[in-house]
């Protein structure tokens, strides 16, 4: 049986955030469809009327921006990185949107 470490620090969101729920899509192996599942899940939730954002920390490839048809639409304002928006209104922040190549 696997035991979970419950003594981890409790992180609190910034007081101005309105994020209510978080869903993590992850795997220890590459090429299993994490980005595809993320994009489909985000799209399905958005179609149900929820406000959706995707945070993509994968530095190995531009899968999430490509799946949503994004280029380099992310930009910074007063030291804050602002997410790109898809045509359907999903906010996307990807490491690949911030990299030159």
Image (cartoon, helix red, strand yellow):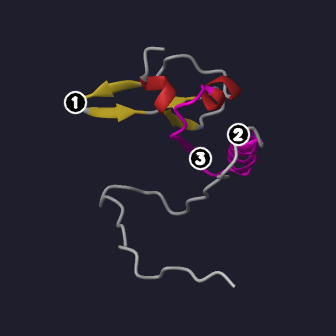
At label 3, counting other C-alpha atoms closer than 10 Å, the crowd grade (few under 14, some 14-19, many 20 or more) is: some
Foreground pick, 54 / 45: 54
Taking the magenta stretch, the answer to whether it contains residue 60 is yes
Q: Which residues are magenta?
A: 33-62
Q: Position of residue 35 (x, y in %)?
A: 69, 39
Q: Which residue is mark 2?
A: 39
The residue at the point 54 percent across, 30 percent down is 85
Q: Quadrant of residue 56?
A: top right
The residue at the point 56 percent across, 16 percent down is 71
Q: Position of residue 86 (x, y in %)?
A: 61, 28
At label 2, counting other C-alpha atoms closer than 10 Å, the crowd grade (few under 14, some 14-19, many 20 or more) is: some
Q: Secondary structure at mark 2?
A: helix
Q: Quadrant of residue 64?
A: top right
The Cα–Cα distance between marks 1 and 3, rounded to whole angstroms, is: 24 Å
Q: Position of residue 20 (x, y in %)?
A: 51, 63
Q: Which residue is mark 1?
A: 78
Q: Secondary structure at mark 3?
A: loop
The residue at the point 52 percent across, 32 percent down is 59
Q: Which residue is mark 3?
A: 52
Foreground pick, 18 / 76: 76
Q: Is residue 85 above or below residue 4?
A: above
């Amino acid at each position: 049986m696997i035991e979970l470490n419950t003594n981890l620090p409790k992180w609190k969101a910034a007081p101005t955030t309105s994020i209510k729920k978080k869903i993590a899509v992850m795997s220890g192996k590459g090429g299993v469809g994490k980005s595809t599942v993320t994009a489909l899940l985000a799209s399905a939730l958005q179609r149900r009327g929820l406000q959706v954002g995707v945070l993509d920390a994968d530095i190995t490839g531009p899968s999430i921006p490509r799946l949503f048809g994004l280029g380099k639409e992310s930009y910074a304002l007063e030291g804050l990185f602002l997410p790109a928006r898809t045509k359907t209104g999903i906010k996307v922040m990807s490491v690949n949107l911030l990299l030159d190549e």
